[in-house]
Image (cartoon, rainbow, N blue to C red):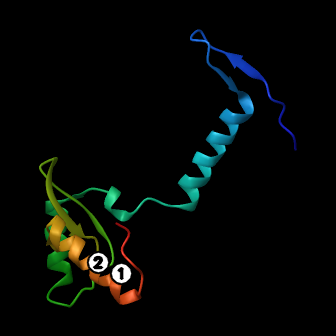
Amino acid sequence: MHVRNITIGRRDGADRSISMLVDRALASLYRSFSHPHPAEDTPLQRKKAVELQQQWGNKPCDHPAFSREYDLGERTGNYCCTQCGASLTFREKAELTAAREAKRGRPRAD
């Protein structure tokens, strides 16, 4: 399939081709489906985290995924494990994630 280059003139004199705009839109759409958002994009209310903790009990947890923690609609700055409800500071989450990455043998992306 070939998309013809059709130029769109703008008032400021800058031109954009439709094929370039289509390419950008398709690339954005591809990224959104091929790289799903991490679980931490989903907020977790503190009340729900406490319920998770009660259901989970004292079992060990490797904290596979995190979400941002909210309390009364306001962000606390902490993260919650989506499996057991444990609340971790940003630093604790970063250290746990770094240790997990080192264990897998992947270098940290700085």
The amino acid marked with disc number 1 is Glu
Is disc 1 surrounded by few (<14), some (14 to 19) or many (20+) residues within 10 Å? some
- Report which residue position mark 2 lands on: 98
Q: Residue at coordinates 80% horizontally, 29% vertically from top-left?
A: 5
Location of the N terminus by quadrant is: top right
The amino acid marked with disc number 2 is Ala
Using the image as rendered, state which of residue 53 and residue 23 is in the foreground: 23
- Report which residue position mark 1 lands on: 101
Tell me the quarter of the picture where residue 105 sits: bottom left
Q: How many marks?
A: 2
Using the image as rendered, state which of residue 96 and residue 56 is in the foreground: 96
Q: Eyeballing the image, is 17 above or below 100?
A: above
Going by the image, does 21 lie left or right of 3? left
Q: Residue at coordinates 34% horizontally, 66% vertically from top-left?
A: 110
- The single residue placed furthest to the right in the displayed view is 1
Query: Residue 109: in sight, yes or no?
Result: yes
* Spot occupied by residue 62 in the image (x, y as percentages of width and height): 27, 85
